[in-house]
Image (cartoon, grey):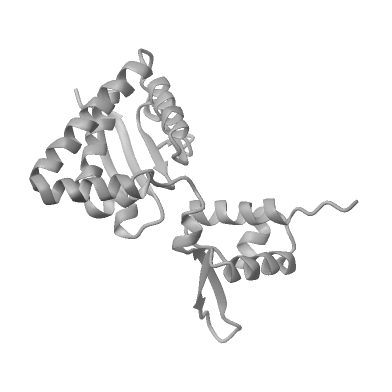
Amino acid sequence: MTTTHQPSTKQDILHHLLKQGRATAQELAETLQISPQAIRRHLKDLETEGLIDHEILHVGMGRPNYLYALSAAGRSQFPDRYDDFAVSLLDTLAETVGKDQVGSILRKQWERKAMEYRDRIGQGSFKERVARLVELRRTEGYMTEWYAVDEANEAASASDSDDRFILTEYNCAISHIAESFPSVCGHELEMFAVALDCSVERTHWLVNGEHRCGYLIQPKAS
């Protein structure tokens, strides 16, 4: 009996594009250690299924390169949104009580979530608490990664690399809500700041058309 690995390979391609934003067939082949011919077959299938799109990249006088990226349908393959009912409910509330009142309600929700995170994260070093926050976000359906800002710098001291982190989320569980009520993204920064008692700066934003949300997280300046 012959076993096919196509479904898992296609999923690997989708995961790679989710994380990297765009990639050529050659880049995918090298990353996934699969022949370019096999990768192109998978890409053709995924494009036929409407899960990826491509754009043509002309470099010099040679053959053009194709850059592949997730389509909206491809991004929806990942757990990245609440039910449409939540958005419809907020729209109804906005029509009934006004957007300002809905904004106040959302702020209260994130304040409550921040305190929940803070309780569940508990005590420990800053690095340990960031790690716990990342795990909590993953259990909620976020594809979250983190790393020390200075971990690639061998000259950096241990304290430097332990104190500044980049937290990256490649999907958003509230993307539909954020489209209609972008203020929730600001509340999310406040939520991280309260949960970790830290300073948070946004580095990337899905709402701005980027392929991920990114945050620089570090202890508050003394």
Q: Residue furthest bottom?
A: 61
Quadrant of res 211: bottom left
Quadrant of res 106: top left
Quadrant of res 116: top left
Whole-percent x, y for residue 117 in the image: 33, 23
Looking at the image, residue 36 sits to the left or right of residue 122; the answer is right
Q: Is residue 125 above or below residue 208?
A: above
Whole-percent x, y for residue 202 in the image: 28, 44
Q: Residue furthest right?
A: 1
Compare residues 91 and 181 and report the one nearer the observer. 91
Quick one: quadrant of the C terminus?
top left
Count up the numbered dots: 0
**Residue 126 in sight:** yes
Whole-percent x, y for residue 192 in the image: 28, 31
Compare residues 103 and 70 and report the one nearer the observer. 103
Compare residues 35 and 175 and report the one nearer the observer. 175
Please tell me which residue is depicted at 32% across the width and 47% down the height of the picture: 85
Please tell me which residue is depicted at 61% across the width and 56% down the height of the picture: 13
Whole-percent x, y for residue 72 in the image: 44, 62
**Residue 155 in sight:** no
